[in-house]
Image (cartoon, grey):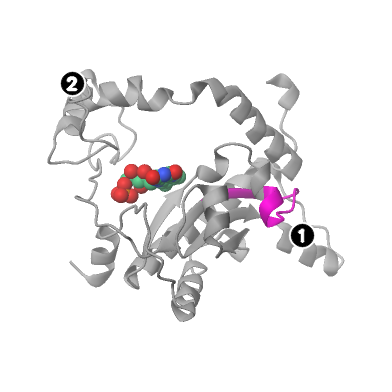
Amino acid sequence: MNDTLRTIHSLRSNHKFTSEEIPKEALEEIFKACVKAANASARQSYSIVVVGDRGVMKETLGYEGSRALIFCVDYNRIVDAAEHMGYNFTVDGINAFITGSTDAILAAQTAAIAAKSLGIDSLFTNSLHRGDIERIYRRFGLPERYCFPLISLILGYSAETPEYFKGRLEGKGVIHYDGYHRLTGEELDWLVNEYDDPEKRLGVIRDWEERGFTHYLDWFYAVWSVRDKRSVPERVKQFFDLLERAGFLEGFPLQQL
Ligand SMILES: Cc1cc2nc3c(=O)[nH]c(=O)nc-3n(C[C@H](O)[C@H](O)[C@H](O)COP(=O)(O)O)c2cc1C
């Protein structure tokens, strides 16, 4: 295994970070590396908000580390530069959102890999979207138009060594050679067993049997996936409202929904 693969395979989510701060030089290396990620039309249609105040991190994201990076889909820099030069740049609705999200996510994962290569641990969290997303706009002064906070990455030095690395499903149903293959009943039975296999370490918990479930996926579908379901309509509505306000749903026939 080469060094790059070793770094990728040593990635894992960490939940508690020490009080040690990331040196400025290391942070700069992470930024230099993450903006190297591929990006549509060489536009880098994202912004990264760097949060250094642990109290603010805890309050807004629910986790704290040395830094939190909030990756936002963002066209404001591009629109402003166009206006500055006397041009009109059209942010083309959902297309812009999908493209900007892709740019932002590629930069985010590159940041996590670069950080790990420097001995810095991380946690991706979408806790940005838990509760009122407006709080993120307000707290960090995000522009309402053409900007949406997508994902945050907490960086720091892990305070604990997790017992094991989580595994991944990597074959059938994930990798489709020469076209899409929908899993058959037999293959779905195999899938259920994969999640039950303690050696594979798939899934978010390991003690599903002690919790009275026959299969991990029984717990996953019956318990984990139905959390917070009561708030789903409000959350979906807020996503739509904010994306509409941001201009990412322009041209979309909302009245037909
Ligand atoms: C979009 C996204 C959101 C996530 N949100 C959280 C979160 O809020 N809290 C958390 O503990 N882990 C979160 N994770 C981490 C995943 O739970 C984790 O990547 C997965 O369980 C696999 O574990 P590993 O990263 O240690 O291999 C998130 C990951 C992603 C990609």
- In the rendered image, residue 25 lying in the magenta stretch gets the answer no
Q: Is residue 257 visible?
A: yes
Magenta part of the chain = 137-151
Say which residue appears at 28% left-offset and 57% top-offset.
160
Q: Is residue 165 left or right of residue 51?
A: left
Camera-nearest residue between 143 and 249: 143
Say which quarter of the image contains residue 169: top left
Q: Is residue 247 left or right of residue 165?
A: right
Q: Earlier in the sequence, mark 2 or mark 1?
A: 1
Mark 2, ligand 1, within 8 Å: the answer is: no
Q: Is residue 144 above or below residue 216?
A: below
The residue pinned by badge 1 equals: 79
Q: Is residue 124 above or below residue 80?
A: above
Mark pair 2, 1: CA separation = 52 Å
Say which residue appears at 50% left-offset and 76% top-offset.
28
Amino acid at the residue labelled 2 = Glu
Amino acid at the residue labelled 1 = Val
Camera-nearest residue between 5 and 201: 201
- The disc at residue 138 is none
The residue pinned by badge 2 equals: 186
Say which quarter of the image contains residue 55: bottom right
**Which quadrant of the rendered structure holds the N terminus?**
bottom left
Asked if marks 2 and 1 touch (Cβ < 8 Å), the reply is no
Query: At which x and y percent is residue 90?
Result: 76, 52
